Amino acid sequence: MSTETTEATGKNKNKERDLWVGFDLGGTKMLAAVYDGDYKLLGKKRKPTKGHEGSEAGVERVLGVITKALEDAEVSVDRLAGIGIGAPGPLDVIDGVVLDTPNLGWKDVPIQKELEKEFGCPAVLLNDVDAGVYGESRFGVAKDARCVVGLFPGTGIGGGCVIDGEIFRGSRLSCFEVGHMRVVPDGPRCGCGRRGCLEAVASRLTISSHAAAAAYRGQAPYLKAEIGTDVSDIKSGALAASIKAGDKTIEDIVRAAARHLGTAAGSLVNLLNPDVILLGGGLVEALPDLYSEVVIAAAQKRAMACYRDTFKVKVASLGDYASVQGAAAWARHTLETKKN
């Protein structure tokens, strides 16, 4: 280890601030990554999230994960130029406040101020799916596209949009809540309290619920024998394995959900005419070919004729690091734009 890295406990106070941290608070894990100015990964740390642990304990875990990532990178906190944190919405992206995340038990948490106080550098808050879409638009399969729309089915369904290198958002709040677009009139009730939302018919939670019922009825023998009928155990990998093993009913359930996603994508094509529809999240990672095939067909069917050949459907390529690299890059973009 060099003299510089052994001094990473704080003795090298005059180091140039040239490093960026990206943090992803979404999904089932916390992931922090440290990048240099060329976005080379220097260090990382991952920890499972704890649902409903409350904001105070949650913030402490965030600070601890970032500290461990800095230790893994063997760098001092004094070299941090900024931190970008992607979190589930809705968010106040101006003041950096997480307004409400039911799955985490957070409400009105000023995470941006907490990060700035702890690490002594500017911090920027953005939606976690926005971070992933921005990461893919800068470094992944959507690089150099003018307009990218992201659809990320998981426990819910997240959405994001990047236009001309900028994340599309409201004047103060994060937006692009595609999971709450109405796609089935008088359809199933969504977690938001409304009926017929995309999330109510196409999320992994909905798919898993239908799959559990199919297994219970004996229509999915592999799933019942290997996984069982507990919805909490039927995750993306289990669904993919079930389909591969020949559980046709499970494939039909997933395809029906993917068609709803594709119909929503087609409506977004009519609205925004994106170059790329970006698919990501655990379900898509587990079943990329199925999702690509079904979403393309449904989107083209829903899109107006003049738009049908103007967009491509692509599967995200950066995995978990789309969000953390995107968050770091967005923090840098935001802070450097403010300086100018």
Image (spheres, helix red, strand yellow):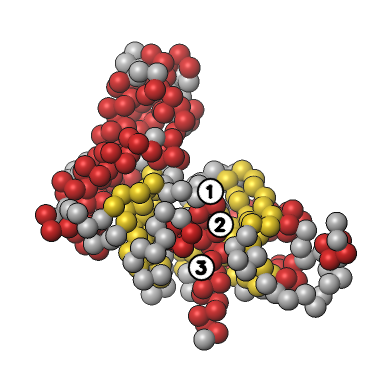
Is 126 rendered above or below residue 141? below
Amino acid type for the residue under numbered disc 1: Asp
Q: Is residue 259 left or right of residue 45?
A: left
> Which quadrant does the N terminus fall into?
bottom right
Residue 330, numbered label: 3
The x and y percentages for residue 290 are: 32, 35
Q: Secondary structure at mark 1?
A: loop
Residue reaching furthest to the bottom: 340
Amino acid type for the residue under numbered disc 2: Val
Q: Are the residues tagged 1 and 2 within 8 Å (C-beta)? A: yes
Which residue is tagged 2? Answer: 324
| Residue situated in front as seen by the camera: 199 or 106 | 199
Q: Residue at (82%, 75%) from the top-left corner?
A: 13
Is 305 rendered above or below residue 97? above
Q: Is residue 11 left or right of residue 16?
A: right
Residue 143, quarter of picture: bottom left
Q: Residue at (48%, 17%) from the top-left corner?
A: 226
Q: Earlier in the sequence, mark 1 or mark 3?
A: 1
The x and y percentages for residue 150 are: 36, 54
Q: Are the residues tagged 1 and 3 within 8 Å (C-beta)? A: no
The Cα–Cα distance between marks 1 and 2, rounded to whole angstroms, is: 7 Å
Residue 170, quarter of picture: bottom left
Is 98 rendered above or below residue 195? below
Q: Is residue 60 in view from this perspective?
A: no
Number of residues whose C-alpha sits closer than 10 Å to that of mark 2, classed few (under 14), some (14–19) or many (20 or more): many
Q: Earlier in the sequence, mark 3 or mark 2?
A: 2
The x and y percentages for residue 122 are: 62, 74
Number of residues whose C-alpha sits closer than 10 Å to that of mark 1, classed few (under 14), some (14–19) or many (20 or more): some
Number of residues whose C-alpha sits closer than 10 Å to that of mark 3, classed few (under 14), some (14–19) or many (20 or more): many
Which residue is tagged 1? Answer: 320
Amino acid type for the residue under numbered disc 3: Trp
